[in-house]
């Protein structure tokens, strides 16, 4: 580990006329004491960095790295049982006086006059971060009147102006709406408006785009950048996504396991990162820039495995219960989708939330009943099965051939069964193997296939990390020697470094076991890396279907263009968001 | 808003209809009917029972009619304000229940106010000072309060009132006011006598509500919106009242829906032990004596009280919570 | 992806010491952290032991009246005597004698100094049958001289031994709570399960039914139901009827818990995975869903028992529940109904104290179980 002092790099601003220092974090440590007597857990250890006026510092790290705690410590928002155990947070005020925020009483008046006024913060979950029972307006007005001597009426006008600046349509009406009446992106805009209400000198953004779709993320990043210029603020942006870092950062601080690993200007980090972990983080984004399938020289047979025609799924449209609720119009979640899947092929289905991609996957698995259309599956012996209408034994046979990997590795394994029981379940209920010895042997094989030691078989899921659980989930899918695996956002819940491991594992297994995949994701990068062909879904429709390379470089459809250009590229030299393509719905 | 209230009122109608059917079935459950129990009570009193009189009684009250006819006659009468006739007291039911139901309503609502006034601040204190001495004390008292059945608490209070103060705490009026007309002095006397019943009745529900408020508030205290508000620079006290407490109040208000049925239940038992001139003792007598019209009227009115309570809590909830108002 | 609280990383297999601990073991470990709940478990265990061994533990038949010992105060149990023969181990109680105040003519009991009634542990008694089956002739405490009487908890207005009655009442009240919960559980599981698994119209009807029942005040309804029960029914039939009446309300809460959990779990991916594994509907419910529900159901059941006990006690106290000669805590408390008897014989409150202890302990256990039901959460 590098010593803390060598990491304290001032970057390019040592010369005259360089931006003034706004905030210095020196040797900051935060600990959590779960209960008296227990040993305190260190959440942040000896962290140093500097924030300059008008510049953006990105704090990067995976879950549990301590990046959020560091940001909260700056504003005195570390919650019990956490506490600042050491170090300084020097805030350089406009009048030149320095205040050590770490030494101030977080509940005291001096700190409160800085909080929200000179340093503001926005959060990840805009839904839960705003009060559900107060109007958006009242929450912004409160922030204004807290730090400025203005009348309620003036504050209201200011709030409307702020909402206009963050591009909320008809702000005069929107100001009296409640949080739940806003969409996700709008809520984040309202949060930004609230944070800007007192023209802060520093904005701390704690993963503000993680819960948003990629096109919305681009809008919000864009907005923050423009507001930064307009107000001349410094920004501390916390994220796990190196792509976002490449787009917006001036300086980067990489955190891992509560320590600061690397700190420096963005180009230095991207081009000459010292630490292997940093390179791995960058690589996990860069790697998705090309297709692993092409590199591996994958072969796709012309034989069709699954043929979907005019598939429809609609919800509602009939009264629920005994006619208590009015029968609304049916929601068409999947609209007339058709495609073919060939043997040995990886088909990606990409789309944002509400695009119907998961509904489509669930229809293919018959977890949901399709409303109309056909799904024709060609069996090993060449005979066809009409999946949408199959039942009983035929459907069970289909479920042996076509298996599923789920998104959430924590919810998809039964917490009350051991790994061996989970893996043996499909073998047992399908009477493939019944003798305990055979089952044990097969479980060992399966674990070996996904790169887990055989002695974990007797453990319960709670003993594994997310990545390991996802491996077990894949092993379960493989238990019955399937021909097709449907993976629904199988890597979305994992940290980026684990993501490529799992993707590569799945590709390895494909070659060994002669599999096909239908891979559902919101992430175009993952799809490009993993798939031969890609289908783009937008509001239930399949707007584009073609070879992954073509769709990801020269897309036809306007929406695909927007989607593609909204995804950060992964290097500061290739910033895309500023001149991205925007999709206007016809 | 108005539309919601109207809709909610309309929804209560089939509900009340169901309640009335339930009550009617309940009072018809015991074997025999009004006339046989009348006969039984006469013969128990040593009087001669004339079978013709009984038959005449049956014919007069239509007891030979099908149940459905009897039900509609009963409920029709109630809608017109006629609750029937109590043979046990030889007077119309409406004359018997008037003041008693009034006192029951008074006692119940006084207890609701007491419960809220005590449970709300204590619950907030316990949540904000989680795991402090005060929290443990309130939590422990809360547990005890929940574990002591109403009637036992009433007995214990009566016992200590006699042993320590040499006072009989039963009844709602001192002897000199018992049959006096309403006056200021009588009101004061009533207020004094209400304290013990309110304590008895309110302890369990206060304990319950305190725990509800504590749990609600604990849920809210660490929500992201609290952090947001803190990040604005709000002071802790203002922050608490404006956000988490405000939001924790919503489920608290909806508890009035179950608070009232519990209080009405408790009121019955407490009144019987403390011999309060409310609905409880008379209902018990009526049930034991199978005085249908009287017990039916009480049961119906008590159930209606909880229906009204739920209605009030629903309306309050809508006023407080925009999420419900707009869905 | 927030990381406000640092979680220990469990990257390496075997990092967690309890990796092979089953759900129940984890739950038990979590429950043990709740000291009060653990202590309460001991108390409730003892109470049920008393209920189980009622005939052996009760010194005298519970119905035996002693006209000469009306409202006899409690006699303390002593273990050693110090008399002419020296200091030695001899369990005994001090005898009381009745005195009449010459002026007011009121009778009162005074301790008869020097007079003791020796008792023996595991002493011989009149033969009886444990649970009505096993013939026995020894009791935990018996008078050394047959025919002598002692009253550790005093007597009631008919001179019946309160301790014996209390022990027999414990059996009735505690098992009635259990039986009531049993009925509630069957109803709750069935209706809640139906409601949660099928949803739609069935769910709507069952939910309205539950809302309806919950909105009615219970005591007046119980009173009406219990009043409809003929007075002259045999005690077992009364017992059964009262159990049904008190469980009428208990099932609603259970049904709500079961339904909520079922609904939430129906779409959990591990349940969907089980369906795709090829499990039959029955296997999905019984092998995959019910075990996950079990711990929550057990917690709810434990919390329902005290409600049943209070219900039975209240009804019997009002004279609407079990009728003498049946004995339950509520029936015993009927003796303490008027102010005159409780000032004269405060020991009549003892059953009340037991009610409070039992209810309190069961509540603590239920709370502990509820907290432990999901041992994976932090």
Image: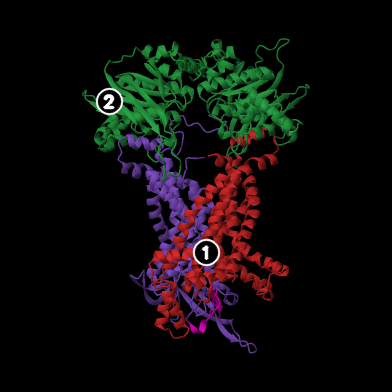
Chain colours: A green, B red, C purple
Labels 2 and 1 in the same subunit = no
At mark 2, the secondary structure is strand
Near-viewer residue (A480 or C262): C262
**Based on the displayed image, in which of its 4 quarters is residue B180 positioned?**
bottom right
**C247 to the left or right of C106:** left
**C374 to the left or right of B132:** left
| Residue A540, image x, y percentages | 42, 25
Q: CA distance from mark 2 to mark 1?
A: 71 Å
Q: Which mark is on residue B61?
A: none
| Residue A583, image x, y percentages | 50, 17
**C337 to the left or right of A435:** right
Crowd tier of the residue under label 1, counting other residues whose Cα lies within 10 Å: few below 14, some 14–19, many 20 or above: few
Above-or-below relation of A178 to A270: below
Above-or-below relation of C258 to A143: below
| Residue C288, image x, y percentages | 36, 41
Residue topped by disc 1? B80
Chain letter of the residue beneath label 1 in the structure image: B
| Residue B130, image x, y percentages | 62, 46
User: Does residue B151 appear in this view?
Assistant: no
At mark 1, the secondary structure is loop
User: Does residue A496 appear in this view?
Assistant: yes
Q: Which residues are magenta?
A: C62-87
Q: Is residue B140 magenta?
A: no
Chain letter of the residue beneath label 2 in the structure image: A
Near-viewer residue (C82 or A537): A537
**Based on the displayed image, in which of its 4 quarters is residue C231 positioned?**
bottom left
Near-viewer residue (A559 or A22): A559
Residue topped by disc 2? A377
Crowd tier of the residue under label 2, counting other residues whose Cα lies within 10 Å: few below 14, some 14–19, many 20 or above: many
**Based on the displayed image, in which of its 4 quarters is residue B49 positioned?**
bottom left
């Amino acid at each position: 580990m590098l010593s803390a002092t060598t990491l304290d790099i001032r970057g390019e601003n040592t010369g005259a006329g360089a931006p003034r220092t706004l905030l210095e974090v020196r040797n900051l440590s935060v600990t959590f004491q779960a209960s008296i007597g227990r040993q305190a857990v260190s959440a942040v250890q000896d962290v140093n960095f500097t924030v300059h006026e008008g510049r953006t510092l990105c704090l990067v790290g995976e879950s549990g790295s301590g990046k959020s705690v560091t940001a909260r410590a700056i504003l005195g928002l570390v919650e019990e049982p956490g506490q600042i155990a050491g170090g300084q947070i020097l805030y350089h005020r406009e009048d030149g006086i320095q205040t050590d925020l770490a030494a101030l009483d977080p509940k005291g008046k001096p700190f409160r006059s800085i909080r929200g006024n000179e340093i503001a913060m926005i959060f990840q979950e805009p839904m839960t971060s705003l009060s559900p029972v107060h109007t958006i307006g009242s929450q912004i007005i409160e922030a204004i009147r807290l730090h400025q001597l203005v009348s309620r009426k003036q504050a209201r006008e200011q709030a409307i102006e702020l909402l206009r600046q963050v591009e909320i349509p008809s702000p005069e009406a929107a100001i009296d709406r409640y949080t739940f009446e806003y969409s996700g992106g709008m809520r984040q805009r309202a949060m930004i408006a609230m944070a800007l209400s007192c023209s802060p000198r520093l904005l701390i953004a704690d993963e503000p785009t993680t819960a948003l779709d990629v096109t919305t993320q681009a809008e919000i990043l864009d907005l923050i950048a423009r507001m930064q210029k307009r107000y001349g603020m410094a920004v501390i942006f916390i994220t796990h996504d190196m792509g976002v870092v490449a787009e917006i950062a001036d300086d980067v601080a990489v955190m891992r396991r509560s320590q600061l690993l690397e700190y420096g200007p963005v180009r230095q980090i991207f081009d000459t990162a010292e630490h292997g972990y940093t390179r791995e983080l960058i690589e996990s984004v860069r790697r998705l820039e090309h297709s692993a399938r092409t590199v591996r020289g994958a072969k796709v047979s012309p034989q069709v495995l699954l043929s979907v025609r005019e598939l429809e799924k609609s919800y509602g449209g009939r009264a629920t219960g005994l006619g208590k609720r009015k029968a609304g119009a049916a929601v068409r979640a999947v609209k007339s989708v058709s495609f073919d899947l060939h043997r040995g092929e990886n088909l990606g289905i990409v789309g944002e939330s509400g695009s119907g991609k998961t509904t489509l996957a669930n229809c293919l698995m018959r977890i949901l009943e399709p409303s109309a259309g056909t799904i024709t599956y060609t069996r090993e012996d060449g005979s066809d099965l009409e999946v949408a209408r199959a039942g009983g034994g035929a459907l069970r046979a289909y479920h042996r051939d076509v298996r599923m990997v789920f998104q959430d590795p924590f919810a998809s394994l039964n917490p009350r069964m051991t790994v061996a029981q989970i893996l043996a379940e499909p073998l047992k209920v399908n009477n493939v193997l019944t003798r305990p010895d055979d089952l044990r042997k097969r479980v060992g094989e399966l674990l070996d296939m996904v790169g887990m030691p055989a002695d974990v078989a007797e453990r319960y899921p709670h003993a594994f990390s997310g990545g390991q659980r996802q491996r077990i989930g894949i092993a379960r899918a493989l238990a019955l020697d399937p021909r097709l695996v449907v993976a629904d956002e199988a890597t979305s819940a994992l940290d980026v470094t684990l993501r490529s491991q799992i993707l590569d594992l799945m590709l390895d297994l494909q070659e060994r076991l002669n599999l096909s995949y239908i891979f559902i994701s919101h992430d175009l990068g993952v799809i490009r890396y993993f798939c031969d062909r890609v289908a783009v879904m937008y509001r239930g429709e399949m707007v584009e279907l073609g070879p992954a390379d073509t769709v990801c470089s020269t897309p036809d459809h306007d929406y695909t263009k927007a989607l593609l250009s909204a995804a950060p590229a992964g290097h500061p030299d290739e910033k895309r968001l500023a001149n991205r393509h925007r999709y206007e719905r016809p | 808003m108005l539309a919601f209230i109207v809709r909610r009122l309309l929804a209560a109608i089939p509900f009340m209809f169901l309640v009335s059917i339930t009550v009617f079935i309940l009072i018809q459950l015991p074997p025999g009917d009004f006339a046989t129990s009348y006969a039984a009570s006469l013969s128990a009193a040593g009087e001669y029972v004339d079978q013709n009189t009984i038959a005449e009684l049956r014919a007069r009250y239509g007891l030979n009619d099908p149940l459905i006819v009897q039900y509609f006659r009963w409920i029709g009468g109630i809608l017109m304000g006629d609750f029937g006739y109590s043979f046990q007291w030889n007077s119309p039911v409406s004359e018997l229940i008037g003041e008693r139901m009034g006192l029951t309503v008074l006692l119940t609502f006084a207890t609701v106010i007491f419960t809220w006034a005590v449970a709300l601040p204590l619950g907030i204190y316990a949540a904000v000072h989680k795991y402090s001495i005060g929290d443990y004390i309130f939590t422990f008292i809360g547990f005890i309060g929940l574990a002591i059945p109403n009637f036992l608490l009433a007995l214990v209070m009566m016992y200590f009132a006699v042993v320590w103060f040499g006072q009989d705490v039963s009844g709602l009026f001192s002897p000199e006011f018992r049959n006096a007309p309403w006056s200021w002095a009588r009101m004061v006397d009533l207020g004094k006598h209400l304290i013990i019943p309110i304590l008895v009745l309110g302890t369990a529900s206060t304990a319950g509500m305190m725990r509800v408020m504590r749990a609600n508030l604990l849920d809210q205290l660490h929500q992201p919106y609290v952090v947001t508000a803190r990040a604005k620079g709000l002071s802790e006290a203002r922050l608490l009242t404006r956000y988490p407490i405000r939001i924790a109040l919503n489920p608290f208000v909806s508890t009035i829906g179950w608070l009232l049925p519990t209080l009405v239940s408790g009121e019955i038992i407490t009144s019987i032990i403390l011999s309060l001139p409310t609905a409880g003792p008379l209902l018990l007598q009526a049930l034991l004596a199978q005085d249908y019209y009287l017990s039916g009227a009480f049961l119906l009115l008590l159930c209606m009280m909880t229906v009204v309570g739920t209605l009030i809590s629903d309306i309050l909830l809508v006023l407080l919570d925009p999420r419900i108002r707009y869905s | 992806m927030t990381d406000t609280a640092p979680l220990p990383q469990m990257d390496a297999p075997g990092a967690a010491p309890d990796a092979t601990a089953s759900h129940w073991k984890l739950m038990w470990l979590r429950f043990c952290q709740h000291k009060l709940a653990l202590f309460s478990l001991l108390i409730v265990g003892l109470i049920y032991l008393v209920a189980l061994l009622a005939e052996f533990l009760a010194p005298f038949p519970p119905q035996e009246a002693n006209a000469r010992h009306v409202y006899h105060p409690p006699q303390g149990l002593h273990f050693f005597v110090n008399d002419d023969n020296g200091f030695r181990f001899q369990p005994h109680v001090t005898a009381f004698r009745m005195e009449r105040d010459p002026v007011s003519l009121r009778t009162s009991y005074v301790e008869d100094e020097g007079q003791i009634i020796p008792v023996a542990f595991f002493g011989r008694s009149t033969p009886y049958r444990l649970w009505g089956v096993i013939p026995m002739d020894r009791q935990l405490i018996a008078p050394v001289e047959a025919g002598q009487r002692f009253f550790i908890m005093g007597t009631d207005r008919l001179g019946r031994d309160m301790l014996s009655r209390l022990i027999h009442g414990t059996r009735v009240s505690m098992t009635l709570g259990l039986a009531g919960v049993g009925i509630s559980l069957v109803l709750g599981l069935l209706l809640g399960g139906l409601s949660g698994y099928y949803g739609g119209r069935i769910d709507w009807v069952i939910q309205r039914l539950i809302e309806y029942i919950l909105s009615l005040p219970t005591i007046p309804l119980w009173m009406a139901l219990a009043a409809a029960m003929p007075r002259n029914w045999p005690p077992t039939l009364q017992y059964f009827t009262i159990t049904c009446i008190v469980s009428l309300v208990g099932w609603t809460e259970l049904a709500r818990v079961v339904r909520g959990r079922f609904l939430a779990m129906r779409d959990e991916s591990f349940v969907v995975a089980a369906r795709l594994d090829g499990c039959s509907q029955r296997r999905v419910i019984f092998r995959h869903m019910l075990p996950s529900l079990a711990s929550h159901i057990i917690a709810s059941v434990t919390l329902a028992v005290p409600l049943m006990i209070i219900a039975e006690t209240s009804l019997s106290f009002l004279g609407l529940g079990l009728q003498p000669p049946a004995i339950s805590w509520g029936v015993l408390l009927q003796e303490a109904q008027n102010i005159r008897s409780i000032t004269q014989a405060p020991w009549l409150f003892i059953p009340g104290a037991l009610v409070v202890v039992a209810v309190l302990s069961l509540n603590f256990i239920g709370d502990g179980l509820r907290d432990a039901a999901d041992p994976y959460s932090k």
